[in-house]
Every structure is written in C-alpha cells, then in structure tokens.
Amino acid sequence: MGNARARNGGKRARVTLHEVAEEAGTSRSTASRALGGHGYVAEHIRQRVQEVADRLGYVPDVSARTLKGRSSRVVGLLVSDLRNPFYAQLAAGVEQTLSAAGYQVVLVDDHGSEERAADGARAFLAMRADGVLLAPVGRPATEVLVEHGTPVVEVDRRSGVRGCDAVAIDSESGSREAVEHLLELGHRDIAVVVDETKWATGKDRLKGYRAALRHAGVPYSRQRVLDLDLSLGPAGPDGGERDAAHAVAALLDANPGATALFAANNVVAELVWQELKRRGCSVPGDRSLVSFDDQTWMHMVEPQLTAVRQPVYDMGRRAAGMLLERVERGPGRTETHILQPELMVRGSTAAPRQG
Amino acid sequence: MGNARARNGGKRARVTLHEVAEEAGTSRSTASRALGGHGYVAEHIRQRVQEVADRLGYVPDVSARTLKGRSSRVVGLLVSDLRNPFYAQLAAGVEQTLSAAGYQVVLVDDHGSEERAADGARAFLAMRADGVLLAPVGRPATEVLVEHGTPVVEVDRRSGVRGCDAVAIDSESGSREAVEHLLELGHRDIAVVVDETKWATGKDRLKGYRAALRHAGVPYSRQRVLDLDLSLGPAGPDGGERDAAHAVAALLDANPGATALFAANNVVAELVWQELKRRGCSVPGDRSLVSFDDQTWMHMVEPQLTAVRQPVYDMGRRAAGMLLERVERGPGRTETHILQPELMVRGSTAAPRQG
DNA sequence: CTGTTAGCGCCTTCAA
DNA sequence: TTGAAGGCGCTAACAG
C-alpha cells in the first residue's frame, strides 16, 4: 500500500498535486477541492482523485499551504532543560493537547540561556508558527514574538512582557504552605536552597518562605538562604553540579543549627538529599526536608519526601489549550491561570529533636 | 531594537523581502543576495539592506524558502512517551545536536501506538522534513518515510525495515551480563519482567536472559517470565499501571522460590520495586533485583539498585549526528551503531539466603 | 460542478 | 554589480 515509486535512491521528486490531477484527469483545483473536502466536487470525481492520491502516495506540501496564507499548524515549544523531569512532563502535556488538535510541535531547549531562547523565538517566527509556548528565560524571546503578533502563552514562569497569556503554579502559596508545615512541627531554624531568585519561580518561592516566617514571627536571615544559579552555570557537563554540591555543603556547615531544609525545586532537592545522605545526616531525625515539586524518586526513597506537588502535565495541557483558544479567537484581553499546588506530607518531615 | 511596528492588535502582515527592498531602494533580488550573503552585492548596499531589515524586524519565511526547493531544515523526532525519562533524555540529546547544527526539531509522541506513529511520519513528510529520528513502533512509520526517500535513523529499537540507519544499545549482551551477575551470586530461580517481548528491545532482553541461563545450565521456565504490554495498554490514565501491578504481584506469588528478579526497563523496574516494597519484601535479603536502564531514583533508594546503565543522552546525540551525515551525504550503505551498556553493581543484589 | 487565473515570499537564472 | 522574470506547490476567487 502507498507504493510511492522509490526511484533513484530515494531522492526523486515528490508527487505533487499536479501529477495527481493529471493522473485523475482533472484540474489541480478540482483535485485540491476533492482532497481538501471544500467546495463542490462530484462524488465520483472525489473518489477517483482520492484513490489516485493514495496510489501515488501523495502527501500535500505544508510549506506551499502555509505560504499560500493559511496557518502553518505549527506551535513552538521552548523549555529550559528536557532532562529535568519537570520540563519533560510539561512537554508531554503540551504535545498531547497540540497533536490531538492537529498541530505540530517544534521543540527548542534553551538550556537556560537567554540568547538561545531568543534564537528559538526567531526560528518560530521564521516558521510562521501559529503560536508559541514558553517557559521564559528573560524577556527577549517573548518580546520578539509578541512584537511580531505571534500568540504566546508563558508557562510556569513569567517574563513580565505584556501581551501574552500565562499559566503558572502558585509558587508563593505553595512554598509558604511547605514552610508553614515545618513551622507547625516546631522548626525555627529553616534553611532554604533556591534556584534563580532574581526572577522566575525562585523569587516567589523565596517570598513564600519569608512570608511564612514573618507570619510566625520568626526572624529571617540571609545566612540561611542559598541561591544557586543552576541553569546559567558553566556549560561543561556537570560543571555546575559540582559547585552546587559544594555550595549546599557550605550552607549546611554554616547552619549547623538548622533543623529543617526547604528545597525550592526538584533539582535542588536532589542535591540537598544527596548531601544529607553523604554526610550520614538522618532525615527527619537530624533534619527535616521538604521539596517544591514532587518527582518520582521522592516517593521511592526512604523516608519518602514531603513535597509540594505541582500538576505539571496538566499545566502543559492547559497552556496548550489556552494557546489554541488564543490562536482561534485572535487578540484580546490576556489571561493568567494560576494552578494550586498541593502539599504532600510524607516521612521526611517531623518535629525537631530538641523541640 | 527590532521595533516591528505592532499594529492592529498584532495581526498585521509580516514584513516581507519586498518591503525591505523597497525601503532600501533596491530590487528584491539584490536585497535577497545582500541578506543571504551570496553573489555580488556592493558592500554599502549590503549594509543598508541589512540595516533596514533589522529596523523593520524582517524574518525570512522558511515556507517560501522550503517551497523554493531548498531544505526545510526540519528534522522529525518520534518517541513513545516523553514522560518516561528514557525518552526525555533521548530527546534532549537529539535536540542538542540538531539545534547546534541549525535544525529545527519537530516532536511527536506516539504513546506506543503504531497508527499515531504513522500519522507522525506523514506529518514529517508533509513538512518536507530533511530527516527523521524515531524509536519505531511497528513498521509503517519507517516504511512510509523510506518509500518517500526521507532519511531515517532508528533509535533504540529497530523496525526491521530496510533502508535506514540505526543506533541501538546492545540489549542482549546487557541483559545477559545482568543475569550472569545474578547467577554468579548463586541465584538459580530468577524471575523476569519484560515489556513487549514480541519485538523491540524486550525481545532481545529476554534473549539475553535465556542465553545467560542456558550458558549456566539453568533450565528456563515460562512461568518465571512476565510479559507486560505497557505502552499498548488501555488509554485511560494509569489504567494499564494497575493491571501491570497486579500482574507483577501474580508473578511473585507464582514464584515464591524466586530469589532474584530482573526488570527489563525502568518502568518495569519501578513496578517491581514498588510491589516488593508494598509486601515488605527485603532487598536484597529476600530477593535481589536488577534493572535494565539506570535512572535517577535507582541510586537514591536504599538499597541502591544494581542496574544496566545505558548512555541514553549520547545515543540521542549519536543518532542525530548520523542523521545529519546521511542528510548531507545522501543515500548509501546504511549503518547500525551498537552502543555497549554497562552493569552498575550496587546494593540490590547479593547472594541468595539459603545459597 | 469544474477549470482558469493569480498569487503567497523567496531564490535563481539570465540579461543588462 | 544589479534588475526582471519565472516558478516552487497549493488554494481561493472568479468565470464558465
């Protein structure tokens, strides 16, 4: 079936609508209508054309279609690190919704680099993407797209650029809840490891941490805060991870009295967990640990980690859905959907020893 | 910078080469040459055109370029489940290599469905993708592509379709090594959980298991084999997982004497591990466990899992590299690269109790 | 109901 | 060194 004649080593010209029409004995327009299902076409003609197309293995050329002015049926997706399960789940959700709607997903991984993100945005523009979903790293990418009138939905993070929709998780309340849980258990000296506090989710998570402390009347101390910059670290393989591990160790050394730790994302949580394990620190005996973002390993380790669960896959689906709506409906009031995370209390948190 | 005049709510026509040429006072051809850097153009003209293009926020239209006959600079990537860290890593490696070479990656997740894979393949064809990377699910997808002369590199699995390159991990020797490790420890009753033995990697992994047994003179029994079909399970969320968990439980019940378990991929390993934990079975005390495919959680749990490590990210990079070569060089003898996995012996395997 | 015509935006001969 | 012309494959008017 579909025996496209495979000649001269597979580099033969593709079957075009012209050939299908010729073979079916009609004009190209008629053939186009027949295959596209628009306009009037005699049923027997429609069938004949369809049959010829199948026999010849005809596949319409989207570039021609796109050029002609219709939509490209392409959506760009820009994430920061596919190896991070968070982004993988996000991408999976996005792909799911988009492919169900007949869109193609063009994937770009910016590795946390603003320039790569902007390059990706330009590539989407060049492809005439109908819309773009991105977890912003700086403003340029979003700016370029919005300026050119491409619908954008920001996911997880927000660049602050006006004119785009967004879907995010309530980082502040999620982390506040996590820290309040620790406070309720009696912890007063709570250290925190964040990634990129200057903007993005890290900022809000730190805010939530501070809010919880303030609310409980516990003084805030910068010394308890470690701000990593994982995504922007040295390009070398694991170059940044080493440094990060050292930094975590230093944080623990500097805060021997800290009875609890709050890790602001899954990567950071892994680092902290490894370091605690490495130094034989018992959890939750010596220190309690909470993570923001719940990943597989967290409920497989012993003790299981208390974590703030984010509906990541759903967030991806949701964002893709918003984008499709925007693409259909055209410009209008932009919206931001905030999803609520959920604290999963498990074994890694308990009352401090000498509480 | 790049102040593309954002008019009428962002749906204005894009800046075209025509406008750039007009604004710069040249013909379109000259403008094209100036921006493309081909052919003769007076230097001052080139600069002026460039400047105008930047000012107007001109972005060349790839559909037009593609239509004109040049390459689309698009590569298709078809995987079976982005939420599986294996595929996420693979995709990350692919994206890395491809984007560095200036290609765009179109991502399709087929969820293990042959039809969706074939649909994806047709979409790649329609986009005139320069090449496609895929972890095959059945033959149709690869067939369609190869018939139409699109270069294909199969990754991890092989469809058996002739005319495409491939990169895979030596599943048979990897699993053989894993099982030999168990045999050396003194295990004789080794149960195995595989995914999709009928073809794909599961088949080879089972082969490796049998080869190891045969070599050691240990009889093979079908009763010790559980063949799951995770990817083809019911579409519903976790519908398949439930059944799978029960099946694993049944396997354990049916083989109370099994002192060791071999899980043929990371998903299966997770199921097995969960079930062992659920029934309070001590590892490696009561049962040893080895996994094929080493994922993060395996060296975070206690005891750490002995696992066959696959260079997944590298496999992705490698496959993408092969594809680019094939795209450049054109048709020729197809190649298959087999990468060697590595057994990481850790705490989940030990001599059987009454050995 | 069907065919003719006219581009979409770009690049690439071919003349000038 | 530059411009004019043609066409990639498709579709949307508009006649017939």
Image (spheres, coloured by chain):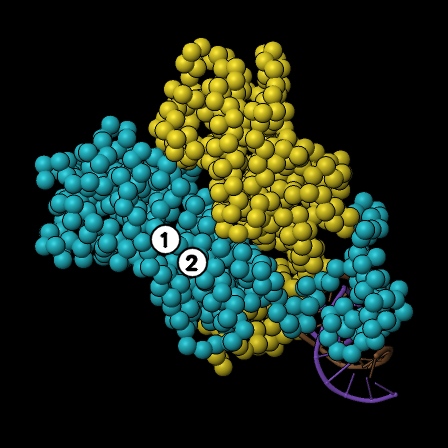
Chain colours: A cyan, B yellow, C brown, D purple
Residue B306, percent from left and from top: 44, 24
Q: Which residue occupies 65% across, 73% down?
A: A69
Q: Quadrant of residue A260?
A: top left
Which quadrant is the N terminus of chain B positioned in? Answer: bottom left
Q: Is residue B320 visible?
A: yes
Q: Is residue B277 left or right of A13 when viewed as pictured? A: left
Q: Are marks 2 and 1 in contact (CB under 8 Å)?
A: yes
The answer as to whether the residues below labels 2 and 1 share one chain is yes
Residue that mark 1 sits on: A310
Work out whether residue B50 or residue A208 is closer to the camera in this orientation and state it. Answer: A208
Q: Secondary structure at mark 2?
A: helix
Q: Position of residue A294 (x, y in %)?
A: 35, 46
Where is residue A328? Give x, y as percent: 54, 73
Task: Give the camera-side residue of A337 and A84.
Answer: A337
Q: Is residue A115 among what the camera can see? A: no
Chain holding disc 1: A
The one nearer the camera, B348 or A322, is B348
Q: Quadrant of the C terminus of chain B?
A: top left
Q: Which residue appears at 69% of the width and 39% of the height? A: B159
Mark 1, secondary structure of its residue: loop
The circle on residue A120 is none
In the picture provided, is B65 more to the left or to the right than A137? right
A75 lies above or below B88: below
Q: Amino acid at mark 1?
A: Gln
At 14% from the left and 39% from the top, the residue drawn is A352
Residue A315: assigned label = 2
Letter of the chain that mark 2 sits on in the rendering: A
User: Which x, y percent locates residue B162?
Assistant: 76, 38
